[in-house]
Amino acid sequence: MRSSLVAALLLSGSAFAAEPRFATTTATACADSKTQLLEAAKAQGLALSEDQIGTLSSDTGNIVATSIAGFEKVPDTEYAKGVDVAFVYIDSPDAGVPAGYYRVNVRANPEDIQVGKYKAIATLVDKDGKAVAQRATRVETFPAPLQAARYGSPMNVGLQQQTLRDYNLTRFFKTVTIIMVRPWGTLVIDLFGVDYSDYYGF
């Protein structure tokens, strides 16, 4: 059986689709943010999956994200070398990084890569090629590639905002994750540096 995370993504498209139900931006603002994301990526020589651009605007801030074009074809074994998986715009005081556009590169230790779940690190790289921050990432590699990630598409990218509590139930943490489903497996990248592993069952 696939993980509960994958089931949620495949069966609850309204919650995890490229246009999340909790986004509060207007249609015009969304269109502008998508256009700006594409232009920023083009300036860095990057091609994006335009049909998977997701936006999130709330009291947490503004996030825009999509996958790097062609990422859906890259096998998970390539994480050992480091793979550019996404391009994001982050503007949030909770994110711990300056507002701006970032290329997201995911790397895993070769000995950790396996069928099933394992940890990796996502590095946020700015327009100057500087590694600005590293973020916890959870990977699940499928035993065999799926024919399509969702509704016939080889890629599905979503944004999710969560408020998590510590074990003592005394502190609350806001986080935004990028959730990516593709034929080879899934990625969950924490953009704010908050440990969400218990929530997703890793």
Image: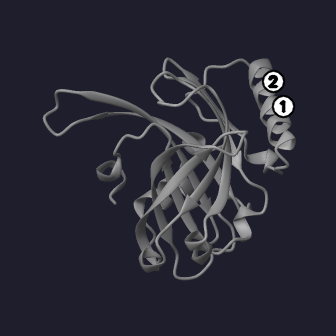
Q: Nearer the viewer, residue 30 or 124?
A: 124
189 on left or right of 57: left
Quadrant in the picture for residue 151: bottom right
Is the residue marked by circle 2 packed among few (<14), some (14-19), or many (20+) residues within 10 Å?
few
168 on left or right of 101: left
**x and y, in percent, of residue 120 in the image:** 46, 62
Q: Residue furthest left?
A: 168
Count of numbered tags: 2
Quadrant in the picture for residue 43: top right
Q: State the quadrant of the N terminus.
A: bottom left
Circles 1 and 2: CB distance less than 8 Å? yes
The residue positioned 74% from the left and 60% from the top of the image is 153
The residue positioned 59% from the left and 41% from the top of the image is 14
Whether residue 131 is visible, yes or no, is yes
Q: Secondary structure at mark 2?
A: helix
**x and y, in percent, of residue 152 in the image:** 74, 63
**How far apart are the two marked residues, 1 and 2, measured between alpha carbons?**
5 Å
Quadrant in the picture for residue 186: bottom right
Whether residue 7 is visible, yes or no, is no
163 on left or right of 37: left
146 on left or right of 59: right
Q: Is residue 39 above or below residue 195?
A: above
Q: Secondary structure at mark 1?
A: helix
Q: Amino acid at mark 1?
A: Thr
Which residue position is annotated with label 2? 32
Q: Amino acid at mark 2?
A: Asp
| Numbered badge on residue 114 | none
Q: Is residue 140 above or below residue 166?
A: below
**x and y, in percent, of residue 111 in the image:** 43, 79
Q: Is residue 50 above or below residue 121?
A: above
Which residue position is annotated with label 1? 35
Is the residue marked by circle 1 packed among few (<14), some (14-19), or many (20+) residues within 10 Å?
some
